[in-house]
Image (cartoon, rainbow, N blue to C red):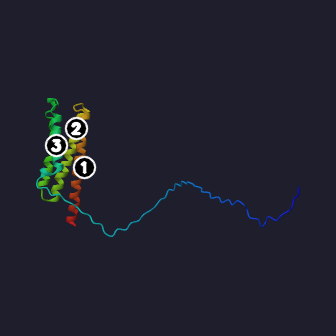
């Protein structure tokens, strides 16, 4: 066997290999960013719709007070006769005076007079709540049956407070 040397530098390779590698990498980055934004407003348009009632009977707050007064009346029917001139009379009068004061406020012309009668109505609503809580405390009323009525008075007080605030705000503008 004979070995000979040859120059391979000029030789061309017989196989050409090209390799393409695709790598998919998923990276999750969680970043917490705190941003402060300042906005300049040149003009704000506010549309206020004031509903004018022709009668106090159209007012939802009066309607709700009358409904609650009727519920208090039904609740007090079962009170003992010994309470006819006590709790029965007081709670019925305080609950009934709420709608009466709202009606009287409606009929007043001066904002201060109107506000005063709404304040009286609110006071009577708190008085009625107090009588209901007393009735629960002494066992005359079932707490479960009084809770919706108490919640109704809370909502009524909230609505009356909105009326009072509106009258305060408007009367201070009139005086300015």
Q: Position of residue 167 (x, y in %)?
A: 20, 58
Quadrant containing the C terminus is: bottom left
Answer with mark 1 or mark 2, whichever residue precedes in sequence. 2
Q: Quadrant of residue 142?
A: top left
Front-most of residues 122 and 144? 144
Q: Quadrant of residue 132?
A: top left
Residue 94 visible? The answer is no
Q: Residues within 10 Å of mark 2 (few under 14, many from 20)?
A: many
Quadrant containing the N terminus is: bottom right
Residue 156 visible? The answer is yes
Answer with mark 3 or mark 1, whichever residue precedes in sequence. 3
Residue that numbered label 3 is attached to: 67
Residue that numbered label 1 is attached to: 158
Q: Is residue 134 left or right of residue 93?
A: right
As helix, strand or loop, the secondary structure at mark 1 comes to helix
Front-most of residues 72 and 139? 72
From this view, report whether residue 31 is shown above or below residue 93: below
Q: Position of residue 115 (x, y in %)?
A: 18, 55
Residue that numbered label 2 is attached to: 132
């Amino acid at each position: 066997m004979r070995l000979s040397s040859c120059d391979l530098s000029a030789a061309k390779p017989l196989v050409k290999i090209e390799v393409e590698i695709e790598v998919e990498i998923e990276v999750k980055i969680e970043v917490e960013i705190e941003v402060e934004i300042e906005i300049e407003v040149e003009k704000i348009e506010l549309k206020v719709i004031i509903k004018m009632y022709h009668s106090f009977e159209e007012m939802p707050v009066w309607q709700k007070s009358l409904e609650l007064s009727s519920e208090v009346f039904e609740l007090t029917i079962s009170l003992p006769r010994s309470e006819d001139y006590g709790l029965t009379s007081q709670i019925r009068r305080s609950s009934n005076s709420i709608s009466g004061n709202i009606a009287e406020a409606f009929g007043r012309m001066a904002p201060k007079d109107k506000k005063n009668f709404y304040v009286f109505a609110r006071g009577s609503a708190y008085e009625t709540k107090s009588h209901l809580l007393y009735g629960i405390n002494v066992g005359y009323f079932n707490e479960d049956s009084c809770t919706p009525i108490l919640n109704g008075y809370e909502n009524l007080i909230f609505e009356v407070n909105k009326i009072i605030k509106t009258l305060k705000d408007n009367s201070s503008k009139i005086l300015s």
